[in-house]
């Protein structure tokens, strides 16, 4: 097991969350995201945060590792919050210059949206940290299997999802390697597009995309050499089955939904 978890990487363990059926975990992960969106105030978000922390404790995954796993995606949280600060107006004005106006409503909304996105990323990372890539692929394929009767390529879609999750940690590692290699050659990186920011970005992206295409070609050649023909005639080593842990997970998410709805009613009554 790696000392630093990244998004899409499996964190080996034998916790109750690890032993749950991957199909149930995938559906419950989507349900948790819906519940987070149902939170209409800070009290509801607090309840969501408490349950998500409880899920990580049940999975025996350190919160620090969970934070490291979503660190590359936190720029989405920052960008969304910044857009809300700039475009949502109302209440007391804190700062104004030309067309830029930072108001009380914008700051409050930005903080709320940032917290909501952060909880969504944490809930998504819990699925990838506690479920092996092959299990996620199989669960995705099983959930889409009923739609195969109308022509939906369930196996192929599941395989694509599995490949994408499998290569996320590798691309993160390669991006870090390319960055260090460029810095060792004297390259400087800046976010200002007028001071070489675009050139700095190209110095990172071109080697990374070249490596991605090389890996894709190698993988396709390996699949052709092994006469891969999709899921036709494929057997399974382990059949998925539901158990008590899955029922407990459903009950926990249902309790989370009830708590959030109660917080929404309580917050509405206070207001």
Image (cartoon, rainbow, N blue to C red):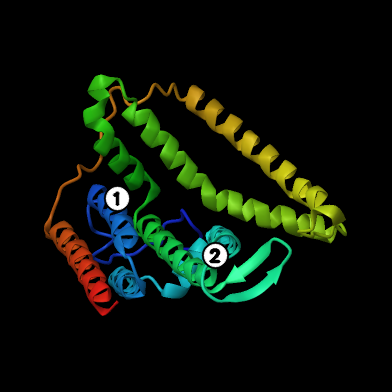
- Crowding at dot 1, Cα within 10 Å, few <14 / some 14-19 / many 20+, comes out as some
In this rendered view, identify the residue nearer to me: 164 or 147.
147
Q: Is residue 3 visible?
A: no
| Residue at screen point 48% across, 27% down | 223
Q: Which mark is residue 89?
A: 2
Q: Badge 1 is on which residue?
A: 26
Q: Position of residue 228 (x, y in %)?
A: 42, 24
Relative to 64, say whether 74 is above or below: above
Quadrant where the C terminus is found in the figure = bottom left
Quadrant of the drawing holding the N terminus = bottom left
Residue at 66% x, 53% y: name it.
175
Tell me the element at label 1. Answer: helix
Residue at 45%, 61% in the rendered image:
117
Residue 106 position in % (x across, y down): 53, 67
Category of crowding for the residue at label 2, using alpha-carbon neighbours closer than 10 angstroms: few (below 14), some (14–19), many (at least 20): some
Seen from the viewer's position, the closer of residues 84 and 95 is: 95
Report whether 270 appears left or right of 201.
left
Q: Earlier in the sequence, mark 1 or mark 2?
A: 1
Residue 266 position (above or below residue 5): below
All told, the count of numbered labels is 2
Q: Is residue 11 left or right of residue 268?
A: right
Q: Position of residue 232 (x, y in %)?
A: 30, 22
Label 2 residue SS: loop
Query: In the rendered image, which quarter is residue 45 located in?
Result: bottom left
């Amino acid at each position: 097991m790696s000392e630093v978890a990244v998004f899409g990487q499996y964190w080996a363990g034998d916790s109750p969350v690890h032993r749950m059926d991957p199909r149930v975990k995938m559906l419950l992960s989507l349900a948790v995201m819906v519940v987070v969106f149902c939170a209409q105030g800070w009290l509801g978000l607090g309840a969501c945060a408490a349950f998500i922390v409880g899920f990580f404790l049940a999975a025996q995954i350190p919160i620090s590792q969970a934070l490291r796993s979503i660190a590359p995606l936190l720029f989405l949280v920052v960008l969304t919050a910044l857009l809300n600060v700039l475009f949502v107006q109302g209440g007391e004005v804190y700062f104004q210059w030309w067309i830029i106006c930072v108001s009380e409503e914008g700051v409050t909304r930005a903080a709320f949206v940032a917290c909501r996105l952060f909880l969504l990323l944490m809930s998504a990372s819990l699925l990838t940290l506690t479920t092996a890539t092959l299990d996620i692929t199989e669960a995705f394929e099983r959930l889409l299997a009923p739609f195969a009767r109308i022509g939906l390529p369930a196996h192929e879609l599941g395989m694509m999802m599995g490949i994408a999750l499998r290569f996320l940690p590798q691309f993160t590692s390669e991006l870090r390697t390319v960055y260090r290699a460029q810095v060792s050659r004297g390259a400087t990186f800046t976010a200002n597009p007028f001071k070489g920011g675009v050139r700095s970005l190209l110095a990172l992206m071109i080697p990374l995309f070249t490596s991605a295409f090389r890996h894709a070609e190698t993988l396709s050649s390996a699949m052709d050499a092994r006469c891969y023909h999709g899921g036709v005639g494929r057997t399974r080593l382990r059949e998925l089955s539901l158990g008590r842990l899955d029922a407990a997970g459903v009950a926990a998410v249902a309790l989370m939904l009830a708590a959030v709805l109660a917080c929404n009613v309580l917050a509405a009554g206070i207001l």
